[in-house]
Image (cartoon, helix red, strand yellow):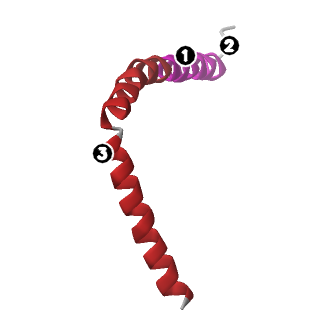
């Protein structure tokens, strides 16, 4: 009985969620529009940090692999 109850409650939650999205679509759309610039800012910052880390690792490896000149 528990499996069927889970499916029924899941379907009810999906129906309630779909109704909520349709009822508040303009607000949801505005929230999505507001999140896009923030995501670009965070994604760009992450890309810069990863790139700088790769450059730092690359420079460290180059210095370690160079043979001392006598």
Instruction: Judge left or right: residue 66 versus residue 15.
Output: right
Residue 70 falls within the magenta-colored stretch: no
Q: In the image, which is nearer the foreground, mark 3 or mark 1?
A: 3
Q: Which residues are magenta?
A: 45-66
Name the residue furthest bottom.
Answer: 1
Q: Are marks 3 and 2 in contact (CB under 8 Å)?
A: no
Residue at numbered disc 3: 22
Secondary structure under badge 3? helix
Instruction: Please tell me how crowded label 2 is: few (under 14), some (14-19), or many (20+) other residues with Cα within 10 Å.
Output: few
Instruction: Judge left or right: residue 55 versus residue 14.
Output: right
Above or below, 1 against 45 in this view is below
Q: Are marks 2 and 1 in contact (CB under 8 Å)?
A: no
Q: Position of residue 5 (x, y in %)?
A: 51, 82
Depth check: give the residue in front, 60 or 50.
50
Secondary structure under badge 2? loop
Whole-number angstrom distance, CA of label 3 to CA of label 2: 69 Å
Q: Position of residue 64 (x, y in %)?
A: 66, 21
Whole-number angstrom distance, CA of label 2 to CA of label 1: 27 Å
Whole-number angstrom distance, CA of label 3 to CA of label 1: 44 Å
Q: Main secondary structure of the magenta part?
A: helix
Q: What quarter of the picture does the N terminus occupy?
A: bottom right
Residue at numbered disc 1: 52
Secondary structure under badge 1? helix
Residue at the (34%, 52%) spot, across then down? 19
Residue at numbered disc 2: 68
Instruction: Please tell me how crowded label 3 is: few (under 14), some (14-19), or many (20+) other residues with Cα within 10 Å.
Output: few
Residue at the (34%, 24%) spot, across then down? 33
């Amino acid at each position: 009985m528990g499996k069927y109850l889970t499916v029924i409650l899941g379907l009810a939650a999906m129906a309630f969620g779909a109704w909520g999205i349709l009822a508040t679509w303009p607000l949801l759309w505005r929230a999505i529009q507001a999140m896009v610039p923030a995501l670009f800012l965070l994604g760009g910052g992450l890309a810069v940090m990863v790139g700088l880390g790769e450059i730092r690792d690359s420079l460290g490896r180059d210095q370690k692999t160079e043979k001392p000149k006598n």
